[in-house]
Amino acid sequence: MTKVAVITAGLGVPSSSRMLADQLSDALRTELSLSGQDATVDVLELRNYAVDIAQHLVSGFAPPALAAAIQSVTDADALIVVSPVFTGSYSGLFKSFFDVIDNTALEGMPVLMGATGGSARHALVLEHAMRPLFTYLRTRVVPTAVYAAPQDWGVGEDDEPALEQRARRAARELAAMLAGRSVTPARPANDRIEPSAPFEDLLARIQAPAS
Amino acid sequence: MEIGVFTVSDVTRNPLTGETPTEGERIKAAVAIAKKVEEIGMDVYATGEHHNPPFYASSPTTILGYIAAQTERITLSTSTTLITTNDPVKIAEDFATLQHLADGRVDLILGRGNTAPVYPWFGKNQQDSVELTIENYNLLRQLWDNDVVNWDGKYRTPLRNFTSTPRPLGGVPPFVWHGSIRTPEVAEIAAYFGDGFFANNIFWPKEHYQQLIGLYRERYAHYGHGTADQAIVGLGGQFFMARKSQDAVREFRPFFDNAPVYGHGPTMESFMDQTPLTVGSPQEVIEKTLSFQEFFGDYQRQLFLIDHAGLPLKTVLNQLDLFGELVLPELRAEFAKRRPAHVPDGPVRATQKVGAAAG
């Protein structure tokens, strides 16, 4: 069973970011089922955690609901992340959510990115803003990122709307990445404290390079 | 079980009056609070160390030396002394001097500090913080435990035939606690030397500190100082009290909401749910404090933060009077009842030769 966490930072109800997130997770589920795999999909709408995230930023720890949400993200086998474009980039809420997750907790995580905006002119936000964020976090981002502008939600002129084609291609890339991954690395829980090396080793490590 | 107060030494505006005390007023208030701590029968007064506004306590042993002359019984301590940026030689000298002046009523909590610019101000790099802690403490131990020290290290100029003076009072150095909010190496240092571990658990939820304290207890036993439940643990806490719970909440809320450390963030209620902060009746303070023993095991020192967030001196002294009358006797009785006979009731350094049981 593949655990997929879907994170969407849309603010409206319903939001176009949520619509895109659903489309991407449906596409992924379809791709996985082709190779006989089941998936559980856990959708996190960040608007529900907005106050908790702000509290975490100023207090340094997560309220219980946010802590559970972070845990479900760090425990997932793959992420689908979608943000609306605000003021030329992903939204502040989207960024803040990743700011409060330990910056090593998502290492190696397969990620599919999406964004929505009021105009197709923002499409490169995915490549110029969002992809560097997930590179910084050392995740593995699939090559295709999916941007949806208002006209994408209408009916396309071709047999299949372009958005669906892109969603399917991105989902196929993510499914392939998941299949190629022989073992899911054990990732530490967000707040897990690893034991220290013994004191004499700690001291020896300082003294060794100096001599 | 020792019970006392610790200060972070903040100079904070009183949100009710709009007035900010002067540094001088806050320093004199520290003396008044310490004297009140002794008067009501508490055991410890501890001061933080900071090197930037809005804090006044850059010179803890000066403050504690003055308090030593004004008190007779309480232990004078720190919360914390910066082991990263202070010269270990100066720490050894200052605290041994204070021991002699205070007739031995001295111990200290070592910590790494939480203010990044302090490192460059003192010629250090923050990325060396853990290494500085390890090397500096190893040197501090030698300065106190050995009459003549020959030493080479990475972060300080070598010492040849050096004797730190005055020698510790009666040949027994001050008891040392190691404070940490997130660093397992610090728990390891405390365990290795058989020192105390202080978890200032005032800002983060208890599950986090349970892990750190658990690591410390496990390693304390590993090094043969005693069983895990005999390890020396200290905890932070904070309260604001009134005889009636709702009065405490009403009176403290403006201070909480405007305090630089937690204001404009979580609500006071959610902070109380998740951290040791108690705002309420004496009975609620008693219950919350006893819950620490349930979460972390039997422990040896409880320090409370009571003079922060712009609370005026008069209020702080009233808080202590109320604590002495209604909380302290109850806590003492209940902690004594819960503690098994083999667990120390105060900080005692393990007598086991350091490292002898390491293997």
Image (tube, helix red, strand yellow):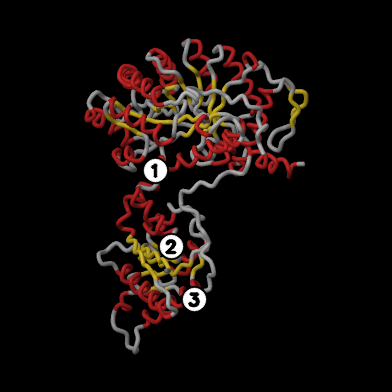
Amino acid type at circle 3 is Ala
**Circle 2 SS class:** loop
Relative to residue B5, is residue A113 depicted above or below? below
Q: Chain of mark 1?
A: A
The residue under the point 56% across, 30% down is: B226
- Whichever of callouts 2 and 3 sits on the residue coming sooner in the sequence is 2
Residue receiving disc 1: A59
Relative to residue B22, is residue A150 depicted above or below? below
Residue receiving disc 2: A76
The residue under the point 63% across, 13% down is: B170
Amino acid type at circle 2 is Ala
**Circle 1 SS class:** helix
- Mark 2 closeness class: few <14, some 14–19, many ≥20 residues within 10 Å: many
Residue receiving disc 3: A176
Please state the horizontal and vertical placement of residue B90, each as a whole percent of the image. 63, 24
Q: Which residue of the protein is positioned furthest toward the front in this rendering?
A: B341
The residue under the point 53% across, 40% down is: B215
Q: Chain of mark 2?
A: A
Apparent side of residue A132 relative to residue A47 in the rendered image (left or right): right
- Mark 3 closeness class: few <14, some 14–19, many ≥20 residues within 10 Å: some
Q: Quadrant of the N terminus of chain A?
A: bottom left
Q: Is residue A116 visible?
A: yes
- Whichever of callouts 2 and 1 sits on the residue coming sooner in the sequence is 1
Please state the horizontal and vertical placement of residue B201, each as a whole percent of the image. 43, 36
- Distance from the alpha carbon under mark 2 to that under mark 1: 26 Å
Q: Are marks 3 and 1 in contact (CB under 8 Å)?
A: no
- Mark 1 closeness class: few <14, some 14–19, many ≥20 residues within 10 Å: some
Depth order, front residue of A181/A122: A181
The mark lying in front, picked from 3 and 1, is 3
